[in-house]
């Protein structure tokens, strides 16, 4: 009996536990001196978080929105954690990627990080995870800032731990850019607090209408500050300059995790604020918000794809590709109808999956060959067949070939653009896919159709602990491309829920 | 007279904007990594002022209910800014730690000298995207 009661209590407090557990364990991990203990503790926690997220998603789909009052203070006075279908999906993505890549860390971290530093590395990793989950789960504008800074500070440390000295400068520049972004966000929150008197997101949404009629300038200035700050965080073109260096010089494990989750959570916050909170205010304003997002998204897609084509380093190529893919996600925001927004949300998850796969595969190549230069890995497809095959699966998904997840998202985006009467945008999506064919095709050509280079003759597959996550991610990339009933259906529901914000 | 009134009631916001912009300018204009951090700290501090000046009422007391007080300041922004100060200190500490490590690795903390040092590496500086 008591066990059942405890079970109930645990379930009730899931929204808080998903943040508290990694935070507490991070502190504990920092105190251990044993590398393997630190790894094991982090692995257990990340998988537990994945289970928590799955339970939350099940609860949300079966019962409905969860509102959790932190410390028992009812919203809007206390901090409210609010889980609905939109952020439950993001929680699944973040914790899922965080859990799946943990076996990979076992060997990758051994190689990248000095032996005495492993507990600190896992401590910052868990803090980063905690911050990202907190940003996703919270329904309080200032709480988002606090968690954003927790995850950002941890991210700067993770990047700075890279082996090469350029990692330090990348981390420093990201610190400056990231802090400016977060500060701009908090200025915006301050302005909105001054006019609405609330920090609770749904409360702000309700009070913005009256505030708009009296103080429309302050409201629009606040929204502008918030969106500029978030755009820095999510690396929206042309505020993406920190991203390629940060990804290129971070330890490979950190790159996989950050590429798959960090920008995605920032985009989630952007979506949440844009639709659920500011939706009505924006649609009444005379500013061309939608047009600006549309132009920036298309510029991101084309500029970054072109840069990716001329890149010799595969990691850097994938980083530019990330900037382009973020453009696709914001494109769906600009389209702003059901299909387009579904495309955005599906692509948020799918891009997380395929970028984790691609960076994991390249990380394995660096692990064995010692370089990610395209000119030095020719013929690798015959020496590391599984890894390169997995890379090809991820690459095809970036291009958007049917039966991969990338196709699903581009399909929704294309349909959305057609429904909105934006034919040129649909055309642009197709043309930009051809650019992806070029940069992915270059890699495929080098690894399969060029003679085996000297450096690669003795190379073999990475250890199983690294290979297993890669294979798992590759299977997921194909599975969710064939069976869209899970991601697609949830994304449609999520899009419907977000679009309701515009109608109020 | 009206101008005087506007200046008298909004001068704190003018100071906030001045501090904010000078902080941002220092971050952008200076090549010294420590000076950049000073600018960043100034930029963050300006935000504290924005929050506090909106919440403080002259003559208002802390929100402790007592018959001797009738006017109270809004405590919430003060609390928020306590958190923001902690975040700011953390950021500055981490930034300075990174600068120390950069100095050990490059022997300088001037951005242009570091970038000159890295001309041959694949690092993209902020000036150009670094493509040949």
Image: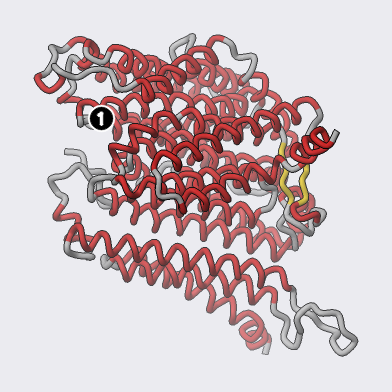
Can you see residue A304?
no
Instruction: Residue lying at the far right in this picture: please name it.
Output: B67
Residue at figure coordinates x 55%, y 50% from the top left: A227
**In which quadrant is the N terminus of chain A drawn?**
top right
Determine whether, in the image, residue A37 is placed left or right of residue A171: right
Q: Nearer the viewer, residue B129 or B37?
A: B37
**Residue B43: in sight, yes or no?**
yes
Residue depicted at 74% across the width and 52% down the height: A70
Q: Is residue B62 above or below residue A84?
A: below
Q: Nearer the viewer, residue B30 or A29?
A: A29
Picture coordinates of residue B98, whole percent (x, y): 32, 60
Image height check: is A160 above or below A64? below
**Residue occupying image coordinates x 63% and y 30%:** A51
Choose top left, top right, bottom left or bottom right for residue A189. Answer: bottom right
| Depicted A121 relative to depicted B114: above or below | above
Q: Where is residue A366? Give x, y as percent.
A: 25, 29
Q: Callout 1 environment at 10 Å: few (<14), some (14 to 19), or many (20+)?
A: some
Quarter assignment of residue A488: top right
Name the chain under label 1.
A
- The residue carrying mark 1 is A366
Please give left or right for residue A170 compared with residue A504 in the image. Answer: left
Under circle 1, the secondary element is helix
Q: Where does residue A242 sit, x and y in percent of width and height? A: 36, 47
Residue A94 x/y as whole percent: 54, 35
Name the quadrant of the C terminus of chain A. top right
């Amino acid at each position: 009996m008591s066990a059942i009661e405890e079970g109930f209590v645990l379930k009730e407090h899931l929204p808080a536990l998903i943040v508290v557990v990694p935070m507490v364990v991070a502190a504990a991990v920092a105190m251990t001196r044993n590398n393997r203990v630190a790894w094991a503790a982090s692995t257990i926690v990340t998988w537990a978080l994945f289970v928590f997220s799955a339970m939350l998603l099940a609860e949300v789909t079966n019962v409905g929105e969860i509102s959790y009052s932190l410390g028992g203070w009812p919203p809007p006075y206390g901090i409210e954690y609010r889980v609905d279908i939109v952020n439950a999906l993001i929680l699944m993505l973040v914790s899922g990627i965080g859990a799946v890549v943990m076996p990979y860390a076992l060997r990758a971290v051994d190689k990248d990080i000095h032996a005495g530093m492993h507990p600190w590395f896992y401590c910052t990793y868990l803090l980063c995870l905690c911050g990202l989950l907190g940003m996703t789960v919270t329904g309080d504008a200032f709480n988002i800032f606090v968690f954003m800074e927790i995850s950002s500070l941890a991210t700067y440390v993770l990047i700075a731990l890279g082996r090469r000295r350029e990692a330090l400068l990348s981390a420093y520049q990201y610190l400056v850019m990231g802090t400016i972004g977060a500060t701009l966000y908090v200025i915006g929150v301050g302005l909105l607090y001054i006019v609405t008197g609330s920090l609770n997101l749904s409360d702000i949404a309700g009070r913005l209408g009256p505030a708009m009629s009296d103080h429309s300038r302050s409201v629009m200035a606040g929204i502008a500050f918030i969106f500029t700050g978030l755009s820095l965080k999510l690396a929206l073109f042309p505020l993406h300059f920190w991203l390629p260096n940060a990804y290129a010089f971070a330890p490979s494990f950190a790159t996989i995790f950050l590429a798959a989750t960090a920008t995605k959570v920032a985009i989630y916050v952007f979506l949440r604020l844009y639709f659920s909170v500011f939706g009505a205010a924006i649609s009444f304003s005379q500013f061309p918000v939608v047009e600006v997002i549309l132009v920036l998204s298309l510029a991101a897609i084309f500029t970054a794809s072109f840069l990716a084509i001329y890149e010799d380093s595969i990691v850097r190529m994938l980083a530019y590709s990330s900037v382009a893919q973020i453009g696709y996600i914001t494109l769906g925001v600009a389209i702003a109808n059901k299909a387009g927004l579904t495309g955005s949300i599906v692509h948020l998850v799918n891009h997380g999956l395929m970028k984790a796969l691609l960076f994991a595969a390249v990380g394995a190549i660096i692990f064995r060959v010692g370089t990610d230069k395209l000119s030095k890995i020719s013929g690798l497809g015959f020496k590391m067949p599984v890894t390169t095959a997995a890379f090809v699966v991820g690459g095809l998904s970036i291009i958007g070939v049917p039966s991969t997840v990338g196709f699903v998202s581009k399909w929704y985006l294309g349909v959305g653009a057609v429904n909105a009467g934006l034919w040129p945008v649909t055309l642009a999506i197709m043309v930009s896919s051809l650019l992806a064919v070029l940069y992915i095709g270059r890699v495929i050509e080098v690894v399969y159709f060029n003679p085996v280079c000297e450096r690669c003759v003795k190379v073999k597959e990475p250890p199983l602990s690294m290979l297993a996550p890669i294979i798992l991610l590759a299977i997921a990339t194909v599975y969710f491309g064939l069976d869209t009933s899970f991601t697609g259906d949830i994304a449609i529901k999520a899009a419907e829920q977000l679009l309701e914000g515009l109608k109020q | 007279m009206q101008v005087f009134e506007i200046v008298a009631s909004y001068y704190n916001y003018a100071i906030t904007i001045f501090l904010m912009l000078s902080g941002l300018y220092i971050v952008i204009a200076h090549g010294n990594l420590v000076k950049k951090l000073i600018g960043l700290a100034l930029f963050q501090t300006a935000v504290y002022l924005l929050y506090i000046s909106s919440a403080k009422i002259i003559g208002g007391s802390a929100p402790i209910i007592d018959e001797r007080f009738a006017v109270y300041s809004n405590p919430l922004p003060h609390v928020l800014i306590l958190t923001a100060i902690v975040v700011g200190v953390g950021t500055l500490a981490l930034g300075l730690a990174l600068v120390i490590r950069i100095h050990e690795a490059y022997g300088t903390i001037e951005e242009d000298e570091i970038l000159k040092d890295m001309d041959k590496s694949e690092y993209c500086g902020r000036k150009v995207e670094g493509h040949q």
